Image: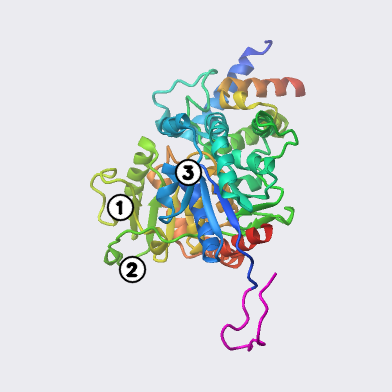
């Protein structure tokens, strides 16, 4: 019930016409120990907090806490044994490619993570009493726990790869993944089986049709809200080094071992004789003797830097791709594993970039690809179209609107 | 197997296409045979696999039905897919359409 107004408000005087206020609600975010999956959710959670709602998190505390503003409420949900195995899991994962990586992802990460999180997520729900549970696509425990307690739940899809059915040409692999989810639900006493990657209440997708392709056939509870960008990562940058030539960022997200080092060396060779500047996000020492037009930095304030860039070279991580396109910066994508080749195909199909090989890329391949997207032509225009679509989609604010409606 | 010479032809054609896609200098210390896997042994990337299938289709035509071949394989078979599996498939399709 709304408070009664004691006087008729003036149209133009403060407070003027207000956004309809919604009562305070409680939202529980369940996330995997993966930074790329936490950051967009954190931007949405921050928006909900600004609107007066109460937000809490559940998952692997050591992975989550550094990425959230201090004072965020985190309910630990990770059995010690699985938490201790995480470094070994990352290490094994880095050695795998394509379908071997996909098999490993489900067998060694997603399903065991679901089991390891289950007791903690249920306890978090019982103690925090959320109105809505927001579950990352890779967290199987949260949808199951929410369904058992009959709480509405939303999916947070921090990569859009699942919305193009990337395994449509391998139906037995699609079925195998569905079998993993079926087994998990049966293990936890749910017999009315769902695809746990897609909530039947609300699916938040942090991209739009301008990049994904045709999305017209999705039902209304699939909300394509565009990227939810957080605060710019802090960090000093020698802005005076940028001399006005076209500048490109080369970033592989988290370092990908020896083949990542090779990639940076090839990139240095490729740009040496080009009239560009390049910033490599890499640990010091990866590129011995970088040419004068290459700057190697362990960290960069990426969102701020993007405003000055003409191209981005990356491995196809969804967040970096969407951050680049939200500034209209075209891409060269060198996919390594997981959803990255799917995202690379999205970028190419949208016309906003080209892809190159990762492990065996040659300097001339790299140079040709970079020169293609740097030319002020169709790729830049296509990246600009994606930028406009992203800006119109609403991002974190739209995601928060949709979550409020669900609560 | 009635047509071993044809099998050998197909094998060398497939190996040639694979070398073109990957690059000869990357395969100096690899002996490609029927048991060579696209995954573990060659580390074929998605872009390279797509390029290989394009070449196979261009050479052997739609009758070779690679989409149908891939669709029929389960996850373990796809992870462990070998050069010999592809050669056998092409040979079987040729016999079926002979």
Residue at which label 2 appears: A244
Instruction: Kindly identify which numbered label has been placed on residue A297.
Output: 1
Dot 1 or dot 3, earlier in sequence: 3
State which tag comes first along the sequence, 3 or 2: 3
Earlier along the polypeptide chain: callout 1 or callout 2? 2
Horizontal relation, residue A69 to residue B74: left or right? left
Q: Residue furthest top?
A: B1
Residue indicated by mark 3: A34
The local crowd at label 3, few if under 14, some if 14 to 19, many if 20 or more residues have their Cα within 10 Å, is: few
Q: CA distance from mark 1 to mark 2?
A: 19 Å
Both labels 3 and 2 in a single chain: yes
Q: Position of residue A303 (x, y in %)?
A: 42, 61
- Taking the spot 67% from the left edge, 87% from the top edge, the residue there is A8
Residue bounds of the magenta highlight: A1-19
Q: Check if mark 1 and mark 2 are on a common chain.
A: yes
**A265 is higher (above) or lower (below) than A218:** above
Front one among A270 and A66: A66
Q: Main secondary structure of the magenta part?
A: loop
- Could you tell me which residue is drawn at 60 percent across and 42 percent down? A142
Q: Foreground residue, A126 or A292? A: A126
Write down the chain letter for disc 3. A
Chain to which mark 2 belongs: A
* Distance in Å between CA atoms under marks 3 and 2: 36 Å
Give me the chain letter of mark 1.
A
Q: Is residue B29 visible?
A: yes
């Amino acid at each position: 019930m709304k408070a009664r107004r004691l006087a008729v408000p003036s149209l133009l005087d403060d407070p003027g016409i207000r956004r309809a206020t919604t009562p305070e609600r409680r939202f529980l975010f369940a996330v995997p120990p993966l930074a790329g999956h936490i950051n967009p959710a954190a931007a949405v959670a921050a928006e909900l907090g600004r609107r007066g709602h109460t937000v809490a998190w559940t998952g692997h505390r050591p992975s989550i806490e550094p990425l959230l503003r201090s004072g965020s409420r985190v309910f630990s949900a990770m059995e010690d044994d699985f938490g201790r195995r995480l470094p070994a899991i990352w290490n094994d994962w880095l050695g795998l490619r394509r379908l071997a990586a996909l098999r490993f992802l489900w067998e060694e990460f997603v399903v065991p993570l679901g089991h390891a999180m289950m007791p903690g997520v249920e306890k978090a729900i019982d103690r925090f009493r959320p109105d809505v549970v927001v579950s990352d696509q890779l967290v199987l425990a949260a949808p199951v726990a929410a369904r058992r307690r009959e709480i509405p739940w939303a999916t947070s899809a921090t990569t859009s790869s699942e919305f193009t059915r990337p395994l449509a040409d391998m139906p037995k692999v699609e079925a195998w993944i569905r079998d993993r989810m079926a087994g998990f639900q049966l293990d936890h006493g749910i017999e009315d089986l769902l695809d746990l990657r897609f909530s039947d209440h609300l699916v938040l997708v942090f991209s739009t049709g301008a990049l994904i392709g045709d999305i017209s056939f999705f039902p209304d509870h699939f909300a394509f809200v565009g990227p939810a960008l957080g605060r710019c990562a802090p960090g000093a940058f020698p802005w005076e080094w940028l001399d006005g030539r076209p500048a490109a960022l080369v970033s592989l997200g988290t370092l990908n071992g020896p083949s990542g080092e090779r990639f940076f060396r090839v990139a240095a060779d490729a740009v040496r004789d080009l009239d560009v500047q390049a910033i490599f996000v890499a640990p010091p020492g990866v590129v011995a003797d970088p040419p004068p037009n290459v700057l190697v930095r362990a960290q960069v304030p990426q969102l701020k830097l993007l405003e000055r860039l003409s191209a981005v070279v990356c491995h196809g991580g969804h967040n970096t791709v969407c951050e680049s396109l939200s500034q209209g910066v075209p891409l060269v994508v060198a996919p390594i594993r997981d959803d990255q080749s799917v995202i690379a195909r999205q970028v190419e199909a949208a016309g906003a970039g080209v892809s190159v090989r990762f492990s065996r890329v040659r300097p001339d391949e790299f140079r040709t690809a970079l020169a293609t997207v740097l030319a002020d032509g169709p790729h830049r225009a296509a990246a600009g179209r994606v930028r406009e679509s992203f800006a119109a989609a609403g991002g974190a604010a739209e995601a928060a609107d949709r979550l409020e409606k669900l609560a | 197997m009635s047509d071993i010479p044809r099998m050998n032809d197909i094998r060398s054609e497939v190996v040639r296409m694979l070398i073109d896609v990957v690059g000869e200098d990357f395969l100096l210390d690899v002996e490609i045979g029927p048991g060579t896997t696209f995954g573990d042994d060659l580390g074929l990337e998605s872009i390279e696999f797509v390029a290989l299938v394009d070449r196979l289709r261009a050479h052997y035509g739609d009758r070779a039905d690679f989409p149908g071949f891939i669709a029929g394989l389960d996850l373990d078979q796809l992870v462990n897919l070998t050069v010999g599996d592809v050669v056998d498939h092409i040979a079987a399709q040729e016999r079926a359409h002979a």
